[in-house]
Image: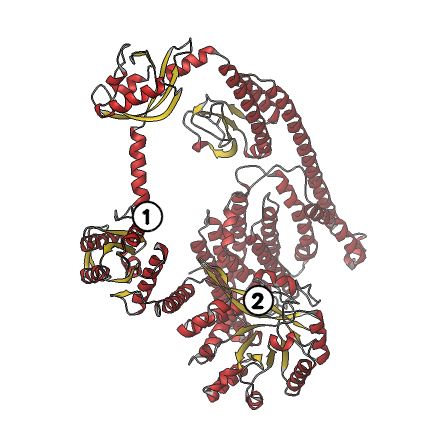
Amino acid sequence: MTTRTARACFGAWILALVALYYTFPATHLYTWALLGYSAAAAILVGVRLNRPAQRLPWYLVSAALAFFTTGDSWYNLVQTLGGEPGFPGLADVFYLLVYPLLTGGFLLFVRARAGRGDDRAALLDALVPTVGLGLVAWVYWIAPFTRAQDLSVLEKVVSVGYPLGDILALAMILRMVSTTGKRPKALLGLGVAMIGLLVSDVFYGQSQLRSDWSLGGPVDLGWTVFYAVMGYTALRPSMRELTAPAERTARAGMGRHRLAWLTAAALIAPAVLCVEYLHGRPAEIARGGIVDAPVIAAAAAVMFLLVLGRVADLALAQRQAMARERALREAGATLFAAATEGDVRAALSRAVVRLMPADRPYHLELPPPVAGPGEVAVRLMAAADLPAGVGSGGFPLVLFATQPLPGGERHGQIIVGAPEDVLHAVRSSFEALGAQIAVVLERIALTAEVNRRDSEAYFRTLIQSAADVILILDEDDTIRYASPSAIKLFGAAIVPGTPLAALVATDAQEALRDVLRRLRHGHGELTGIELAAQDAGRRRVLVECDMRNLRDDPTVTGLVVTMRDVTEQRRLEDDLTHQAFHDSLTGLANRVLFRNRLEQAFMVAERDGATLGVLFVDLDDFKEVNDTLGHAVGDQLLLAVARRISASIGAGSTAARMGGDEFAILVEQSDSADAAEDVAARIVAELGTPIEVPDSEGGLHLVSGRVSIGVATNRGTANATELLRHADLALYLAKGMGKGDWQRYQSDLAHAMVQRLEMRTQLHEAIEGEQFMLQFQPIVELADQRVTGVEALVRWQHPTRGLLGPFHFVEAAEESGAIVGIGNWVLRQALRQIADWKAADPATTLRYVSVNVSPRQFRSPDFVEQVRAALAGAGARPEWLLLEITESLVLKDADKVIRDLRALRAMGVRIAIDDFGTGYSSLSYLRQMPVDVLKLDKSFIDDILTSRQQHALVDAIVTLAGNLDLAVVAEGIEEAGQRIALDTMGCDYGQGYHFARPLWPADIPALTASAQPAALPA
């Protein structure tokens, strides 16, 4: 079950219980218990579905709801049995236990969100409003209990416990709200639930003082909100965020909203003092002052101190930020003066000392450089995740920074351990410092590279350590010098005086002599010469040689030969070449190799006048094998089919796997087309018997290997591409004729049939794959241009052709029957969408959604029930739906059509005739058919401004509709003049590009947000 389904079920269940509770007072005991326990159970279900990082807080909240419900159930049971619940009594025990459980759960949320750091600012921000709300609770809620003369001490303690618990739980909510970082959406739900609980508890307490409490009154709504919202919030995926650590950053100030919050909270005490003074009670006047003045003064003092503490924190944060900025500037100056990596390390150590707060402990570690490339990065890391040999100084969390070092083969590491709040505060500074270090290291590397290139020793070392073998030859082609890398290539050191020919294989001697001759006679440089050499163990080695004639260079006076071993490279190239032209699963030729051979064979056959055949082979129902037995069995089936095809085609033909379950066969030159057809017949016969294939677990499965084959020859084709297309069309023809056989290409039938079959197949796959989407075109009132409706327009997100309009697929859908499935999907999706819009904005101007219904869909035996089920499933009201039918619908089964239309209207659904005047326009049927709206086709509107006759005709239709109490919607309005003319005629509504093109669902709410005319996009 998805969380969306669970939320929908829970919401419907709660609404039903609330309705029963207020409709049937006799069922209070049971409906209220079901309401509370359902909410507690919903929290457990939400924990199971959403799997939060910490489950204990949610379990505590669920237990709190269960205790609350148990107390209510006991209270209701006593009343149901004719008794009067005592106060305090057993129910109060359960009630009071709710608050420690709630507070404990909320406190765990706070700890999970705040992490391991100390968020003092968030704590102060939460304490200020908490004290203010506590003051209000004391004056107007708690104090009346303490002064009540008719309550015992125990009764007063219990009565005071409720507001104290509410304030404590609300304080936890405020603490979560004030935590740094993005607030979870689920937090709003918790706040609404606690407000509901607080409001009901306040009214319940006042009722207790007046002794006029009664069950089933409006006060219960607050507790209902508490139950329902708590359960619903736990079912939302965002509930996981309440137990995930918040992303914290350094804060140097506070936002306007938080400042307004603290200001309002700080003004609570003066406001209460003024209210108490203006509405003083007789007892207060008699005593010469306000009874609660000490409490109000104390609260004001506490809030003043808290605000001072917050201001002090802001000042400290500002000073720390300025200090870090100054430290970064000083560190940058020191770093840019560094000339070596050691200088950078020293400057980095000094910079860290300046960046870290002087009064907070920290640990800095700069381990030796580590082999391997790295990147400039700074991230928080748990001490347990640090690399071996690196410490955190006893801190559980560290900043772990990496920095690539010159050369790219090493990287440095920086580990700074400190309290979590300190790490958050300095992280951005360390990121800036890392960027500075990267620039300095790059400069140092460039300087060192220039110095190395200027050093003669560098070049000598380069030759000695080069991987390539460098040889210098004398005039007799003997080796005078060989670099040390020759030992690795040839397996032994090369003795000076060894002939170069001794290193080359016998079959490459002639090539070597030719190269040396060309080099000595005018070619100063030869590169990329490939020879076969042999090492000391007579192992054959492929070498690539670059040769230079430097006999005239006094520092060399010889031929320089550079050799590199390319044996493994050539082997890999051969392997890659094979992989590039062969299928990795079956070993057959792939599409590329098949196409190359076909191109060559086609040219030869065209030259010789021979017949060339191509077969396209497709496994029938291969998808079912993959879906039912798995892809491992499917791969084995493809291997078995490939082997049987290879055995059936004989020598001289090429079999290839084109991809998926498709194969192709090239039957090369023959005297007639019979050769290709004979091969097709043999393959069909060979694969007609079931194939036994193994699975990955050692089991055997007997599966069908039946294939459909399309056969085409080069007769009548201009090129190889056309031949492939003919074979492909013939394959689709074979599929359409029943599968399990072969068909020859027939130009008069293949093309149209294949297109229809392809479109039908794709449509059914599109329904299953939910490839359809909805756009909505606004329908506006012409008088004031308010958007009051939308028409749902289906689009097909085709996997290869992109977004397609109905023009491209509706006809094929009608022919295949897929239109019924598409129409049902559009109906359900459109109703869900308008229900979402209505729920998100109850004041929206949108009144209905218009859905087109095809005749084939409407004539479904249970169409009325389908509409009823779609309304119920979406939670939509019938009057939100307008069904558009065509005039031709009544040409068949008119009586049944009219009965169904009347049933739909009786349900509350409205009916519109779409494209009125373009089809079977019978005034008698118009009078008899139970419809509400006429939609004028665009063809009537196009010439309304230029044709007097067209204007008169539209005017007559609008007048006729008005006389029949039918609303009129003009389609295809594209100009302001058309809108004005239609409005003058008395046409009610319009739609078209003048108002808006079809829009995506997310764009509609902006046009329907209020009763004011919408700014519609052209």
For the residue pair 450 and 299, the one nearer the viewer reads as: 450
For image coordinates 50% across by 83% down, the residue present is 888
Q: What is the number of callouts on the image? A: 2
**Residue 259 appears left or right of 692:** right
Q: Amino acid type of disc 2?
A: Phe
Residue 776 is labelled as: 2
**Residue 251 appears left or right of 344:** right
Residue 772 position in % (x across, y down):
47, 64
Where's the N terminus, which quadrant? bottom left
Label 2 and label 1: CA atoms lie apart by 49 Å
Q: Amino acid type of disc 1?
A: Asn
Residue 459's quadrant in the figure?
A: top left
Mark 2 or mark 1: which is in front?
A: 1
* Earlier sequence position, callout 2 versus callout 1: 1
Residue 264 position in % (x across, y down):
72, 49
Residue 124 position in % (x across, y down):
65, 41
Above or below, comparing residue 593 to residue 562 in the picture: below
Residue 1008 position in % (x across, y down):
65, 66
**Residue that numbered label 1 is attached to:** 596
Residue situated furthest top in the rendering: 554
For the residue pair 433 and 746, the one nearer the viewer reads as: 746
Disc 1 on helix, strand or loop?
A: helix
Disc 2 on helix, strand or loop?
A: strand
For the residue pair 248 and 331, the one nearer the viewer reads as: 331
Residue situated furthest front in the rendering: 608
* Few, some or many residues within 10 Å of mark 2 (<14, 14–19, 20+): many
Residue 332 is labelled as: none
Above or below, comparing residue 551 to residue 929 in the picture: above
Where's the C terminus, which quadrant? bottom right
CB atoms of marks 2 and 1 within 8 Å: no
